[in-house]
Image (cartoon, coloured by chain):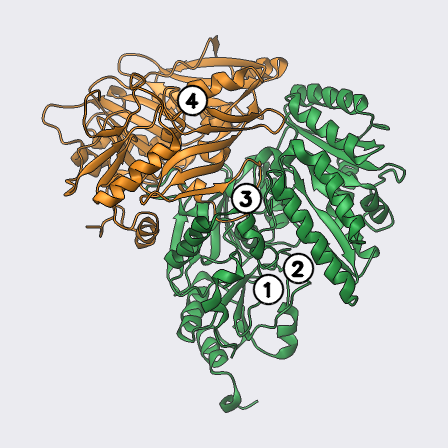
Amino acid sequence: MRSAERDPLVLDLERALGANGVAAAPEHLLAYECDGLALLKERPRVVVLPRSTDEVAAAMRVLRAHGVPVVPRGAGTGLSGGATPVAGGAVVHLARMKRILSIDPVDRIAHVELGLVNADLSAEAARHGLLYAPDPSSQTACTLGGNVAENSGGPHCFKHGATTQHVLGVKVVLAGGEVVVLGGPDPDPPGYDLRAVFVGSEGTLGIATEAWLRLVPRPAVVETLLAPFPSLEAGCRAVGAIVASGVQAAALEMIDDRTIAAVESSIFAAGYPRDAAAVLLVELDGAPEAVAADAARVREICTAQGALSLQEARDDEERKRLWRGRKGAFGAMGRVAPDLYVMDCVVPRSRLPETIAAVTAIADRKRVRCANVFHAGDGNLHPNISFDGRDRDEVRRVLEAGEEIVRHCVSVGGTLSGEHGIGIEKNDYLPLVFAPETLEVFVGLRRAFDPELHMNPCKAIPRSMCGEIAARPAR
Amino acid sequence: MQGDPAVDVRRDRGAAGAVTPEDVVALLDEARRLGAAVRTDVFPFGEPPLAKVDRPVRRIDVRTCAGVLDHSPADLTVTALAGTTLRELQSALASAGQWLAVDPPEDLTLGQIVARNEWGARRTGYGTVRDHLLGLRFALADGRTLRTGGRIVKSATGYDLHRLQVGAMETLGVALEATFRLRPRPPAAATVAIERHSLADAHAAAMSIRALPDAPAALAVFAAPGAPARCVARYEGHAAEVERAARSAGGSPVPDLLLPRDADGALVLRVACRPSKLLASIDAAARALGEPASRLAIRAHPSIAIADVARPLRDGEDPLATLRDAAGAIPAGSVRLRRPFEDARPIRDPLAERVKRLFDPEGRLNPGVLLFASAS
């Protein structure tokens, strides 16, 4: 193609980043049409592949000069559409910024570029006897930048906290190309804790390119227990009893019979009993005496609540196998149907049993195939609805069931998302949990960071509040 | 403050009747109509000399806006009004064997703890109030009330405006009620003390303890003129665990941490940096105070990497000038003034300034605190 015919935006970006820092060919753009929320797709106008914070800043200056909206992207594993392109917009893909800049074992701080994959940091930290605690199920693929954007969790966040508790500071490129550092490696920096609103802001405030992350010592002892139950409700009661007993588990994960069936027929097979209605995976970590005492208590509680058996991982190999089923659950659901809608809602833990019953009733009424795998300790549900995206009636029923489940969770004191974020999946549900005044301040906060609202427009706020952004011409 | 006509919503227990969040909102609304500045009770340890405010000032003092609204032991969450003291809250939680895992002075209110990001020695093991804050209802300068977060232990829903309020000194809003995540009370605790000749040796002992597999709930080092330096470590958890951990830390068993308090009339600088830089920062602060470290009162938390460095305030001394000297000398991190008053230094941060204008466009909430350099 002669340059006279080429998109002037692409030419300007190539001048700033070099030709191999920009992708605009249709076959390249195709790969960016959606993230893990495959229900919604849009092709970007251009994809930028920066190698440094300076290049991100340079790209942002060009994009602003052209008035082009920007969608940041990590690995595209997000499940709420946070990385779904906007029409006529650019995607800034951080995949090339994946260096570990330093790990200081005395300070227990990792300084990383945020295109780094979560599990790669954990592997490097392990060499120093340290651990990066947030462990989303997608940790072998998802980037730390995506984790920062979504305030990601994971099974072990029950004890150790979600991403926001592990981010000491972030380097951020704002929409106009300005680079700011929010927080930092030193505790309690003067001024406002803007990193608090940045973490979990879903790429709407700027692009985080580097972070200082807190590492924690690896626990002396880890014990993993598997308890199958004759009903999901019995398993949920056991979870409540474990928490009420004062045991501080590292993780409390529930996996239902439909998920067990899918997992056990897949490459993620973990040896979960196929005849159980649910299995509870309990992990305890810490000092040997504490783990031994807590494990005894957990066994006692599970038995009292009707556990069919109790299995302990005898070594790391067995532990990995037990976790393989849990972490591979979403992948295994591919056996059930071509498409999967992974939902994410939170309820107060004490409302879990009734919520699970409600989810089942809604799924039955809407005739959708729903399996449940969830962070029971946190009250964080993941109803997984399998469907065939070619069946328009089924898609409609899936979306209707999703909405009813969300509304139910909110009605019992829960909220829209525990760890996947709002994105474009749930933005129109925000008024269920936030008053108009709060939503207005959310938009104001975005304007404080990004006066022209170029960053990930129309994500994480109701569509009714982003009219002026939506009206932007596509090309 | 009895009889102070400027106190419109009073915290004193003696005042007739309790105030409600609605009273606070009504006062903010009135202040808005009058164009008045609003000063909340964010300096329980002594107010700094205030920047001149060329408008009327309304004081809000909300200690009687107190009480636990909802404690759900099965969910490990509690919601309480912002005027509730930490002591009242912990005592309400004790019967369920639970606690809010922070330990600043217990007579502080939850609103003060959030606004000031106030903490105690057990920050080493449990983090700050930011780590436990699940949700907040707060009022903006114009009386609008917002609520973010919720009574659930995990959320990726909306912007974390509640965590933004931590340490913001109520310049972005006035806390009305807060929800926290709770922890089970540890069944046992053990504390040990190690004496050394110098602060550096006591600090080295603390860093060795920090490197052991058992994580202490608190780890502190303190020194004062004429006494040996001390390292104290406290373990909390199961009895067998804490006994073994305390034994492996070495030293002598002591009943509690017994951290020294700041002396009356002291000038206290607080340095905050990375653990590996703490000793160097303490030395720099000592130089700024014009004394060798051996003649200062020092209370350091090696794992958190924050230390308070103190000596008596000298006659005619300008504490802010001393602070400026220290700020220019420390090798990493930050330094601030804690006594005889807290500094409210200008922060040159245009982004923070835009955020401030969003919450308080007329600059009426606690003017002079967390001042912005270009603010009028």
| Viewer-side residue, A260 vs B277 | A260
| Residue that numbered label 2 is attached to | A37
Name the chain letter of the residue that bears numbered label 4: B
Q: Which mark is residue A163?
A: 3
For the residues labelled 1 and 4, the Cα–Cα distance comes to: 45 Å
Q: Amino acid at mark 4?
A: Leu
| Residue that numbered label 4 is attached to | B86
Q: Where in the figure is residue B262, as x and y percent of width and height?
A: 28, 19
What's the colour of chain A in the image?
green
For the residues labelled 3 and 4, the Cα–Cα distance comes to: 27 Å
| Vertical side of B370 occupied by A308: above or below | above
Whether marks 3 and 4 lie on the same chain: no
Name the chain letter of the residue that bears numbered label 2: A
Q: Quadrant of the N terminus of chain A?
A: bottom right
| Vertical side of B235 occupied by B370: above or below | below
Q: Which mark is residue B369?
A: none
Q: Which mark is residue A84?
A: 1
Contact, mark 2 vs mark 1 (Cβ under 8 Å): yes
**Which one is in front in this view, the residue at disc 3 or the one at disc 4?**
4
| Viewer-side residue, A188 vs B55 | B55
Circle 2 packing at 10 Å, graded few (<14), some (14-19), many (20+), is: many
**Which one is in front in this view, the residue at disc 1 or the one at disc 3?**
1
| Image side of residue A407 versus residue A148, left or right | right
